[in-house]
Amino acid sequence: MGGLDSALGALWASVSQIFDPFCGSAGIFTWFGPGTNLACGDAGWGDEIGFGFKVTVTLATVTLPFGLLIGFLISLAAQSQERMLRRAAAIYTTIFRGLPELLTLFIVYYGMQILIQTAFSAVGIDERVEINAFFAGMIALSVVFSSYCAEVLQSAFKAIPNGQYEAGFAIGLSRPKTMIFVILPQLIRIALPGIVNLWMNLLKDTALVSVVGLTDIIRQTGVAARVTKEAFLFYAIACALYLILAVLSSIAIGYIERRTSNAGANR
Amino acid sequence: MTHVIEMIPPRAAPPKRESKINSARVLGFLLLLLWALLGFGLLSMMIGNWDQDKFVKYGPRFLSGLATTVGIVVVSISCGAVLSIPIATGRMSKNRIANTLTYVYVYVFRGTPLLAQVFLIYYGLGSFRNAFETVDLWWFFRDAWYCGLLALSLNTAAYQAEILRGAIRSVGRGQHEGAASLGLSRSVTFWKIILPQALIVALRPYGNEIILMVKGSAILSIITVLDMMGETRYAFSRTFDYQAYLWAAIFYLAIVEILRHTWAAIERRLTRHLKR
């Protein structure tokens, strides 16, 4: 088993080595980097920036499902019959749409640190706790994303006529089944443009997590800029990488939109 | 054979059995309770850890930070509004060069994080010190406040240009044609017919943009601008008192909520002729 595992690991390593867009065999820095500050390996900053790129993409993609799920639940609560539930959801969206993202991040980051510290000292462990920046960033960004997402989904819910629910109940589907099989597919199609905007904002907001020490694009290019004194070059590269992310996601989203607009009945 | 002589007298429908307690109500109650507990905890923390020295020391700094934030937002929104007019014009022109240039401008500024733009302008342009000294512009790019302002203005100009363009596009063709058939000149048509209708459409997005700027200006604290967020970070770095962030949160929430409600009132007032 161990042999197979290591073989698979080696295979994966070589595959990712070949297809790495920065320092792989066909990577941009492998071809244009050598001799400059952007070389791969110890000679330059190419591989560090490539790593930062992966961290940024990972953070955004990991945050997305949590944000969508929480946002969906909040939007359900916001249109519930129950006044108390609506009020609680409204407080949530008001707070997290009103706070600057940076402040939310600091509150989550330092707040969690203090909470865990007090919990530890209550148990009797006296150790300095350092919160993982990735984790804190994930929570803060999910919270911000979800509060905006709730708003988008709520207006999408309003676009679905009541008859859809009634038809679902009339053919004997339970409430959860009506929601999942009848409402949700239509909801996704209606809410997609709004969610696409939120995804773009999420990609940009990940840059803020570099402030609490996440080694993302901004952090890595910033370190490179400080060491090499070529700040303009490296920050321009950072901007270019974010632009590439935006272009790539708009291509992917265009594909999804074409798929979803073909599905379902024309209205 | 029997038959019914007396009908059963009509009765009221049985009362609907509706339990006072359902899951949604319980959940809502619990969540509200959670918020109330959080708010209470926040309040008790602020009262319990009240420190007169800190208040005297950091309170005035906090207020000056608030003034800085407001100043930054006002100046950058105004500069952005001025800048956005040529950009929106370029976006709508049939000239291919102007169109492409402004499209690229808008795409770049909307597609990259504000933080990266701020760094690019403050640290990136700052590395061309000699060039700026020869043209006597170094005083501008040396100062974090000016650089932050420049970045915010350029950023919001891109967004405002899109708002403006979308709003002008949203005015129907018939309005143009109607004005043309009345023999109005192009400039009169634009100023008296198109723009008033467009601005009403643009009102809500402009309000959102101002709120986004209030939130975005917090980013300038990272390049040492002492706005409200900057003062908060300063206070936290000196005292390690978590309350600093909570105060900042309260202030930012208050600003945003006041803005939102004022803007909604303005919008209601300006669109009262559209109500049916």
Image (cartoon, rainbow, N blue to C red):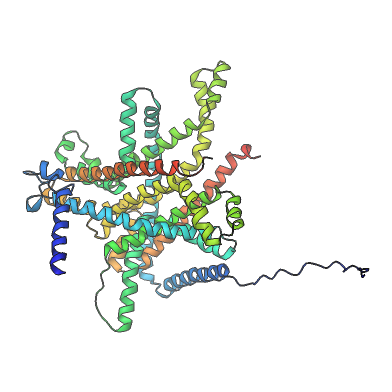
Residue A168 in percent (x, y) is at 57, 55
State the residue in front, B111 or A110.
B111
Residue A240 in percent (x, y) is at 24, 42
- Left or right, A50 with reference to A265: left
Say if B143 sits above or below A65 in the image: above
Quick one: which residue is furthest to the top in this view?
B183
Say if B138 sits above or below A163 in the image: above
Say if A92 sits above or below A31 in the image: below
Which corner quadrant holds the C terminus of chain B?
top right
State the residue in front, A215 or B205.
A215
The residue sitting at 45% across, 57% down in the picture is: A71
Say if B49 sits above or below B119 in the image: below
Quick one: which residue is furthest to the bottom in this view?
A124
State the residue in front, A107 or B44.
A107
The residue sitting at 44% across, 70% down in the picture is: B42
The answer, for residue B252, to whether it is visible in the render is: no
Quick one: which residue is furthest to the front in this view?
B1
- Left or right, A4 with reference to A90: left
Q: Quadrant of residue A250?
A: top left
Which corner quadrant holds the N terminus of chain B?
bottom right
The residue sitting at 47% across, 31% down in the picture is: B169
Count of numbered labels shown in the rendering: 0
